[in-house]
Image (spheres, rainbow, N blue to C red):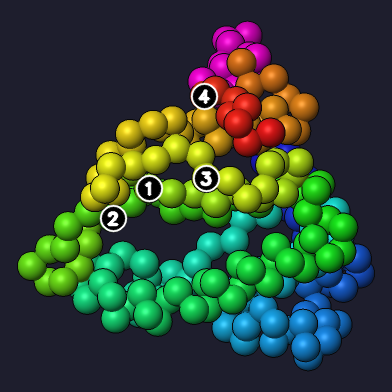
Amino acid sequence: VASIARLHTRAYGLLKSSHSQQALDLERESVATRDRYGRHKFGQTLLLSRRLVEAGVPLIQVNWSRSNADQWDTHQKNYPRLRKLLPPFDQGFAALLEDLANRGLLESTMVYCLGEFGRTPRMNKDAGRDHWPDCYSAVVAGGGLRAGQVVGASDRMAAYPTSDPIAPWDLGATMFHNLGILPDDDIHDRLGRPFRISRGRVLRELL
């Protein structure tokens, strides 16, 4: 209980600090910058993430809205929903990368953009696309990674990889490598049991 109380105290102290409050205050940004990211939840959250990078926060996760109306789970009416979802995504994500680059932060910040699975290569009876784990894409940028390249390829239906398949644990291993952590090293729990940091391969083609 005492350990949990100490963690709670640290967490509340972090939130109450003036440094944190300034980082979380989007009103400090210009109107033009806020408009560039987009006046929607995703865009403003990405802007907040850039402010957290500047404040020295080492790990930031940005999620898309969880409301049912804004979900990417396009089991029905795939194309009408994407016409609504893609413009704010494109606007916010492009603004983040451009802003990080202009501020000299992109080379020291790794940006990973991906979902947990892909979509079926064929439409279903409801003009939607269902879950598909065999082939999907990710965008990675910054952190010293090589820009402007496409790694890997799929068949013409985007159903299965045909060359250089990359797994989620490979992205994790590459991230650890860039952080100076050996991904094939072990960490040990309090009983001395070893646990491999990552069983993925470092994607040398991205470096």
- Residue 200 can be seen, yes or no: yes
Checking the image for residue 136, the label placed there is 1
What is the distance, in whole Å, between disc 4 and disc 1 at their CAs? 17 Å
| 109 drawn magenta | no
What type of secondary structure mainly makes up the magenta span? loop
Could you tell me the amino acid type at mark 2? Arg
Disc 3 packing (10 Å; few <14; some 14–19; many ≥20): few
Q: Position of residue 133 (x, y in %)?
A: 30, 43
| 188 drawn magenta | yes
- 99 or 16, nearer to the observer: 99
What is the distance, in whole Å, between disc 2 and disc 1 at their CAs? 8 Å
Disc 4 packing (10 Å; few <14; some 14–19; many ≥20): some
Kindly indicate the quadrant of the structure image that contains residue 152. Answer: top left
Find the magenta span and give its range: 185-199
Disc 3: which residue = 150
Could you tell me the amino acid type at mark 4? Gly
| Sequence order check, earlier mark of 2 and 4 | 2
What is the distance, in whole Å, between disc 1 and disc 3 at their CAs? 13 Å
Disc 4: which residue = 200
Above or below, 69 relative to 164: below
